[in-house]
C-alpha cells in the first residue's frame, strides 16, 4: 500500500494540497490563489512527466496560462477601478 502512495515521490499529493489551497484562496477572493495555482500546476507537470502522461503536462500548461490571464485581468481591473487623484 505504501508503495502506491509514494510511487511518484509524493509529488501528486503535494500537487493535490497546493491545488486545493489555490482554489480555496480564489474562493476567498485572494489574488495569491493565482500564484499558488501556477506553482501547483508546475508540480503537476513534474508529476505528468514522471507518470509519462502527456495529457497532464498539456493540461497544466493550459491551466498555467489561464492562471496568469486571471491574475492579469484581476490586476488590470483593480487598476481601472481605482479613483484618480483628480476625482477627489
Image (cartoon, grey):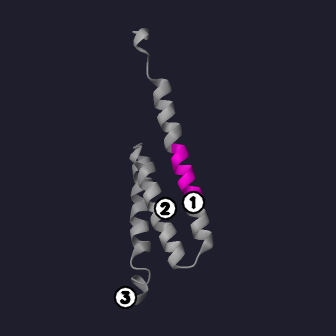
Q: Is residue 58 above or below residue 22?
A: below
Q: Earlier in the sequence, mark 1 or mark 2?
A: 2
Between marks 1 and 2, how big is the CA–CA gap?
Answer: 7 Å
Q: Which mark is residue 2?
A: 3
Q: Earlier in the sequence, mark 1 or mark 3?
A: 3
Q: Is residue 16 left or right of residue 48?
A: left
Q: Nearer the viewer, mark 1 or mark 3?
A: 1
Give the farthest residue toward the left. 2
Q: Which mark is residue 61?
A: 1
Residue 53, image quadrant = bottom right
Work out whether residue 8 can be spotted: yes
Magenta stretch containing residue 63, yes or no?
Answer: yes
Q: Is residue 39 above or below residue 81?
A: below
Q: Position of residue 4 (x, y in %)?
A: 43, 86
Tell me the quadrant of the picture where the N terminus can be found: bottom left
Q: Residues within 10 Å of mark 2 (few under 14, many from 20)?
A: many
Q: Earlier in the sequence, mark 2 or mark 3?
A: 3
Q: Residue at x 53, y 74 (%)?
A: 49
Q: Which mark is residue 41?
A: 2
Between marks 2 and 3, how big is the CA–CA gap?
Answer: 25 Å
Q: Secondary structure at mark 3?
A: helix
Q: Which residues are magenta?
A: 61-70
Q: Residue at x 57, y 79 (%)?
A: 52
Q: Residue at x 39, y 47 (%)?
A: 32
Amino acid at each position: 500500500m505504501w508503495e502506491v502512495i509514494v510511487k511518484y515521490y509524493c509529488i501528486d499529493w503535494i500537487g493535490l494540497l497546493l491545488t486545493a489551497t489555490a482554489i480555496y484562496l480564489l474562493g476567498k477572493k485572494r489574488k495569491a490563489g493565482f500564484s499558488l495555482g501556477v506553482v501547483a500546476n508546475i508540480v503537476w507537470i513534474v508529476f505528468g512527466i514522471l507518470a509519462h502522461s502527456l495529457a497532464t503536462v498539456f493540461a497544466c500548461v493550459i491551466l498555467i496560462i489561464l492562471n496568469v490571464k486571471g491574475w492579469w485581468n484581476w490586476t488590470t481591473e483593480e487598476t481601472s477601478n481605482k479613483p484618480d487623484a483628480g476625482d477627489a
